[in-house]
Image (tube, helix red, strand yellow):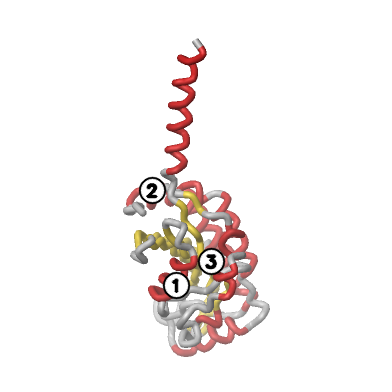
Amino acid sequence: MKKSLLIPVTLLMLIVTGSFAQNKRVAVVSFYVSKQIDVSDFGAAAKEAAITLSDDPNFNLTPLLIGYHDQFFNSYAKNFPFDLIAEGDVINTDAYKTFVPEGNESDANAKYVTPYTGYKILTTWNENDNIKHLLAIFSQYDGLMKVDISFRMLKYGFNNMGVVKMMATTTISLHNKDGKRVFAITENGKSKSVNPMVAGIPVMTTDKVLPMCQSAMDELMKALDKDLPKLIKKTDAKL
């Protein structure tokens, strides 16, 4: 009687062990927000104003980054068909801490990027080479993920008349062990709040722009709550 009971239990243990063994593991290696507001819909004066805003220490997007980061790991991560490695196991790795991404010194916008505490900044400059270096550091995992946030100002109106809204965009990209991109999910959120233009130029002061960024992030996170499961299903998420 005891023998007949042992067989199902053993089989059950094998099944459970096998199911855990099949779980893929992915390390998030970059998580940041850009302070450089995209004002490409406007002229040179707006671009200069955007640079001045980026240099303003009061234009602090860190609270927005923290809120998104926490939501990402506590909620959004559950939608992926793989496990995300604990952050401490990534950012506290000695080889990762000493790793210096290539190309940031040539990227004029890199100085306006704010990483979440402990993370490296991986911009599009030399991205493939940097991914290869990180894959060598984290060869025990099945893939690497990068998450970033950016903002763009949108014009609503004609000529020099109208208002502006802010659009927040996040890109979640995944590379497999061979360094090939498996997917890049992009989602947007537009601010409910608006600001005026003066002579066709948006008002680019911290007190005007920061609340719009917050509003846009709120809408972006609502969109991800709704759309991320569907977006993941549409991608070839095989590692």
Q: Which residue is mark 3?
A: 31
Q: Secondary structure at mark 2?
A: helix
Query: From where the camera sits, is residue 106 visible?
Result: yes
Image spot of residue 108 (x, y percent): 48, 86
- Count of labels shown? 3
Q: Quadrant of the C terminus?
A: bottom left
Q: Which residue is mark 1?
A: 133
State whether residue 170 is above or below residue 229. below
Task: Residue lying at the far right in this picture: please name it.
Answer: 58
Q: Earlier in the sequence, mark 3 or mark 1?
A: 3
Q: Secondary structure at mark 3?
A: strand
Task: Residue lying at the far front in this picture: please name it.
Answer: 3
Residue pictured at 51% horizontal, 81% vertical: 110
Residue pictured at 46% horizontal, 57% vertical: 141
Left or right? Give the position of 58 relative to 43: right
User: Within 10 Å of the Cα at label 3, are there few (<14), some (14-19), or many (20+) other Cα atoms?
Assistant: many
Left or right? Give the position of 163 relative to 181: right
Q: Amino acid at mark 3?
A: Phe
Image spot of residue 111 (x, y percent): 55, 82
**Residue 230: numbered disc:** 2
Q: CA distance from mark 3 to mark 2?
A: 22 Å
Q: Secondary structure at mark 1?
A: helix
Residue pictured at 50% horizontal, 59% vertical: 27
Q: Earlier in the sequence, mark 2 or mark 1?
A: 1
